[in-house]
Image (cartoon, rainbow, N blue to C red):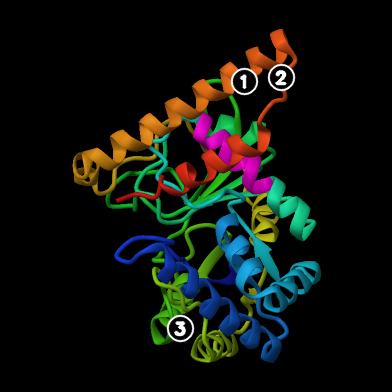
Amino acid sequence: MVEVFLAGNAHIDPVWLWKWFEGFWTVRYTVRRIVELMKKNPSLTFVFSSAIMYEWLEECEPELFEEVKRLVREGRWIPVGGWIVEPDCNIPCGESYVRHALYGKSYFREKLGFEVRIGYNIDSFGHNASLPQIFRKSGYEYYIFMRPGSHEKGLPSLVFWWESPDGSRVLAYRHPVGYTVSGEELYKVIKSTIASPQIPVMLILFGAGDHGGGPTEKDIEAIRRASEESAGCKVMFANPEEFFKRILELYRDIPIVKDELQHHASGCYSVLSEVKALNRRAESIIMAAEKMSVLAYATCGLDYPRSKLKRSWKPTLCSTRPV
């Protein structure tokens, strides 16, 4: 008997075919919609990443931010990713990923009282092999991704231990369908998952994405209908962490993957070279400033400019979205 765990999501690129200010207001609109939907549907769970989006919400809608905090305390709104944004996972240097975790996780800890353990890059075009090491040393246990898809890279299972060259591991899950599945399509995905499960427990993230939106009443109705028609199978809203724990209970001999997770949209790495070069230059300059600041503190007793360096890192980290 397969178990189907479901959680709403609303993938938002802060900047893509629009400027950051449009992304700013997309966050506000999307979160307001989701909070209202969750009030009407007390069992609904929802995952949302990217510390910068929570910061925007805190700035422009403090009362709505308090509603989100309440839902987090209830265990229904689940912060995932824990980084400043969901970045490209090939081009940035390792120190950028470390700063994503440092600044992102500390924000969630301070503002929401929440320790993020699920790494989450649902739309990144590839994933370099050093990430499990960075995740583990940053306090993560799990990882959710979607690309490369099954037609782009063969994997032994949807769920596997992803291992870095140093031996660090996270339990990884390749989401089997698009993260924007919704409405009647969602109903069909649930029915086909029940008919032909790939692993004993399946996780499906649903809801409109890319430019916000998230789950809708039609999605809730599709899930309810699929559940009623699938006697003997568990179809439930859940925290993805519950999914991973259930996998560890039911799935024996989880395979190990010691490799990069590549390739998707390879040509994207040959365009807009100026943006990528400027990003690398910014990383190098800030890291040089950090080193010189440490020397100035150690040799001359000068104050370490922690807040200034953080202000420099955050826009640089936000620029690491894939293009």
- Marks 1 and 3 sit apart, C-alpha to C-alpha, by 56 Å
- Marks 2 and 1 sit apart, C-alpha to C-alpha, by 8 Å
- Magenta highlight range: 95-105
Q: For the residue marked with disc 1, what is the amino acid?
A: Ser
Of labels 2 and 3, earlier in sequence is: 3
**Closest to the observer: 94 or 23?**
23
Of labels 1 and 3, earlier in sequence is: 3
Q: For the residue marked with disc 2, what is the amino acid?
A: Leu
Q: Name the residue under label 2.
A: 302
Chief secondary structure of the magenta span? helix
**Closest to the observer: 152 or 206?**
206
User: How many numbered circles does the render carry?
Assistant: 3
Q: Is residue 198 above or below residue 172?
A: below
Per the image, label 2 sits on a secondary structure element best described as: loop
Q: In this view, does 7 lie to the left or right of 68?
A: left
Q: Name the residue under label 1.
A: 293
Percent from the top left, x then y, of residue 186? 44, 79
Q: Nearer the viewer, mark 2 or mark 1?
A: 2
Q: Which disc number belongs to residue 187?
A: 3
